[in-house]
Image (tube, coloured by chain):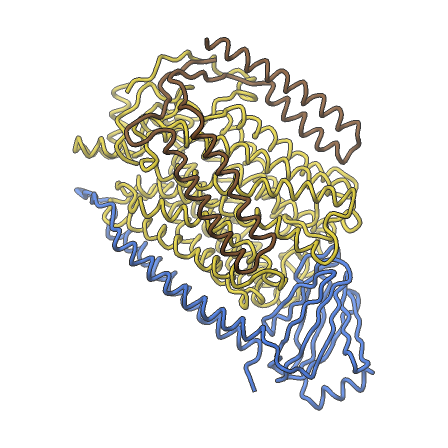
Amino acid sequence: MARAGGSGSEGRGGGVKGGSVPLLAWAGLQVLLGAMLAIWSGGMPSLLLIGGAMPLVVLAAWNQGRAAPAETRLLPGESMPVAVLAIGIATAAVGLTAGLWLVLVGAEIAAFGAVWLAREMVLERRWLK
Amino acid sequence: MAVGAPVALPAGRALGWLVGTDHKRTAARTAVVSLGFFLLSGVLALVMRAELAQPGLQFVSDHSYDELFTMHGSGMIYLFLTPAALALGLYLVPLQIGAADAALPRLSLWGFWTYLCGGLAMYGGFLTADGAGRDSWNASIPLASSTNTPGVGMDLWVIGVALAVAGSLAIAVSILVTIVRRRAPGMTMLRLPVFTWAMLATTFMVVASFPVLVVAMGLLLAERHLGGVFTGATGSIAYQHLFWFYGHPVVYVMFFPFVGAVAEVVATFSRKRFFGYRALVVSLLLFTALSMAVWGHHMFITAAVQNQYFSLTSHLLAVPAGIEYFDLIATMIGGAILLRTPMLFALGFILQFLIGGLTGIVVASPPLDYHVNGSFFIVAHFHYTLFAGSLFGLLAGVHYWFPKATGAMLREGLGKLSFWLLAIGANVTFFPMFFLGFDGMPRRVPDYAPRLGDLNLLSSIGAGVIALGVLVFLANVVVSLRRREPAGKDPWGAQTLEWWTSSPPPRHNFESLPAIRSYAPLLDLREAAEAWPAPEEAAAKEGAAA
Amino acid sequence: MGASTRQDFDGLFSLYLWIGIGVAVLVFAAVAFALVRYRDREGRVPSRRSEANALELGAATLIVAVVSLLVFRTFSTEAKEDSTPPAPVRIDVTAFQWGWRFTYPGQGVRVVGDDTEQPTFAVPGDETVAFALRSADVVHSFWIPGERFKRAAIPGRVTHFDIRFEDRGQEEGLCTEFCGLRHSGMRFDVWVLSRASYQRWLSAHR
C-alpha cells in the first residue's frame, strides 16, 4: 500500500461539484431527444433514451452529496479478492448453461471473494487512521 | 504545488502484474489482453478473406464460415476495440488531470477480470461440439433461439458478451468518477485536455447504453433456455431496439477516445495548442448525445421504426463532426508540422475516417439505405471508420504515448513502414467493397456470384498487406523494448500534464505539479519562458540533466 | 408514367455522392495545404491563435444548410416511396429457410424454390407492383439490387411495399439478412417483362 497526498480537486473555479455540470447537461440533451421521439412516435424507443440518462443523473446527485476527497489518499497496491470475486461471478454466469452445480460453485467463489474484499477494505480503513 | 511523500511499492512482483490496482497496471493488462484478442480475431478475418478470394467454397464449410464472421466481429468489437479505447483512457486520464491514481481502482480491476472471463467464454465456444457463436455480432430474434441456433457455444457467446460488456462498463465508471472528482487543483472542467474531454463524453455513452446490452443478453439467454421472452410479431423488433440502443453508441465508444488521441498528436506535432477548444467541448457533448438517438437507422428496412426521426438525428451528426474536423485542420494551419510516426497515423485517421463518415451520411437516408443495407457497402463503411479510422487513431496514440508508458522510444523507420503497409492494405482491402456491395454482394456469405470474383481477389490481397503491417508493428514493439532508446520525460515537446512526470511515471504518478492555467499547461510554461527547443534538443537536455 | 424505384434511388444517390466527393476533396486539399505550407522548417514559429468562434459558427451553419437539403430530399423521396398508388399487380412473397415462395393472389400462380433450385418470378415493367412480404421462420431480407430496394421479412408481420420495375430483362434477387446455414444460397430471379409477355407468363404458370 502507498500513501499519496494532495489529490483533492479543490481549486479556483473548479472543484468536485463542478464536475457534475457536464453530466447534467448531457442527461438534459438525452431527455430532450427522448421527448422529441416520444412526441413523434412514442413507445419503447423514447423510454430507452430517457431511461438511459438516469444513471448519469444518479451519479451527479451522488457526487453533489459527497464531500470532496480527502487530502491524503490511500492507494491500494493489490487486490486479490477482486479477481476472485470477478472469476466467481463469471463462473456462475457460465454455469447458467452448464448446470446448477457450476452456478453454485461460482456463487461460492464469489461469496468467498466478496467477504475477503470486505475484510481487505475494512483493514485498509483502519490502517489509514 | 507539492504532493505528499509517497511510499514506494515493491516492483516486479508477479502478483502485482495480475492484481495490482495501479490504474497504469490495469490499463496495461487490459491493453495487452485486447491486443491478443485483436490478433486472434484478425486471423479469423484472414481465413475469411482466403475463402472469399475466389467464388465457390474452397476452405471452410457454411457452418464454419458463420462462426468465423461472428467471432471476428464479436472479438473485434467486444474484446478488442472497446476495451482498448477504455484502457487508453484509464491509463492517461489520471495522468492528464494530475491525479495520483484513478478513482475506484478496485472497480476497474474487477472490470478487467470480468472482461477477460467474458472473452475466454466467447472463444471457448470453439471447443464445443456445435462450435462458437454463429449468429453475427449482434444476434437476432428468432434466429438466436435455441431451436434455430442450438449448442452450448452460442450460450457461451451470449454470456461472454454480457461479461465483457459489464467489465468494460466498470472500467468506464472508474474513468468517469476520476474526471469528476480527482482533478488536481486548478484543473477545472474547462481546462481538461482534449483527450480527457473525449474520454468523458465516451463514458457518458457507456454508462447510458452498456447496461441495456447486459439486460438484452440476459433476456436472450432466458429466451434460449426458457422461451417466451421475445414473442409474437413484436418480439424480433423489441430485441433489435434493445440491442441497437447499445449497438450504435458502442461504435462511437470505439471512435471518440481515438479522435481525442489524434487531437493531442496533431496539436503536439503542429507545435500549437488545439484550436477551437470551446467549440470542441460543445461538439463532443452534442455528438455523443445525438449518437444515442440514431440507433433506428439500423432498422430502416424493417419499416417498424420512425424513419424520419432517426434519419434526421443521423444526418445531424455531420454538424459536430464537421466542427471537429475544422478544429483538427485549423490546429495544423499556422503550425510547424513534424511528420513523425504518430502524426502519420493521425493524418491517416483524419483522411480515412472521413471516407467512412461520409458513407455513413449516405446510409442515414432510408431510401439509400434500402439498397446498401446488409451488403458489402456497409462492410466497407464500418471498416473505414473502425479500421482505417479508429485503429489508425489508436496506433497514433500508441506511438505517441509508448515512450511515456515504457520509457523507451519506438523505432521511427519501422513505425513509418508499418504505417504505409497498413494504409495501403486498408485501402486495397476495403475500397473495392463499396463497389461489391453496390453491385449486389450481401454480407455474411462465404460464396457469391462469379462476376464479383476479381474485386474480391483484390480485397483479399489487401488483407495480406494488412497482416504484414501488423507484423511490422509487433516487431517494432519487440525491438524497441529489447534495445531501448531512452525517452526521457518529454521526447516530443508536448503540452499536457502526463509529460511533466517521468517515463514511466511512478506509482503515485507525480512528485510535483506545475501551475495549471489552461488545457495545455506545459505549452503555457514554454510560451511564458519564450523558449522553444526542438524535441531533439529537449531530449538532449534531459539526458545531460539526468 | 412515373419514375421507377431505381430512378428515385439514382437521383437521390447522385446528390449524396457529389456532395460527399466535394467534401472529401475539400478536406484532402485543406490537409495537403497545411502539410505543405506549414511544414516545420528552420526559423518557423507557430502561430498562437487558437480560437475563431465566429468562423466555427459559420462553418456549423453551412453544414446545417447542406444537411437540411439532404434531409429534405430524403424525406420527399421517402414520402414518394411510401405512397400507395393503385397497383393492379400484387405479389405475396414468403421467405423461409432457405428459399422463397411467390404467390399471385387471384391469379392462381405460385412459384417456389430454395437454395438447390432457385425460383424465378415475373413482373411487368413500367407498372407499380405491390408486394406483401412475410417470413415463415426467422428474419430474412428481400433485395433486388437492380431496382435498388430491399425490405426485411419479419416473422409475425406483413410488410407492404411497392416497386416500379424499370429495365426489361432478368434481375437477380438475394436475401441480405443473415438467416442461418444456407443464407448465401437464398436467391431468386425476376423477369421484368412487357405487359403482353407478362400475361403469357401468368397463363403458362397457372
Classify residue A63 as left or right of residue C49: right
The image shows residue C183, relative to residue B46, as above or below, that is below
Q: Residue B421, can we see it?
A: no
Q: Position of residue B275 (x, y in %)?
A: 28, 46
Which residue is rendered at x = 69% and y = 63% of the image?
Answer: C153
The colour chain C appears in is: blue
Horizontal side of residue B132 vs B294, given as left or right: right
Query: Is residue A35 depicted above or below B510 in this figure?
Result: below
Residue B521 in view, yes or no = yes
Q: Picture quarter containing residue B216?
A: top right
Return the x and y of residue B403 as percentages of the image width and height. 39, 30
For the colour yellow, the matching chain is B
Q: Position of residue C29 (x, y in %)?
A: 32, 59
Q: Quadrant of residue B503?
A: top left
User: Does residue B269 appear to the left or right of C2 in the view shown?
Assistant: left
* Residue drawn at point x = 43 percent, y = 23 percent: B101
User: With respect to residue B109, does B302 lie above or below?
Assistant: below
Chain assigned brown: A
Q: Closest to the observer: B407 or B209?
A: B209
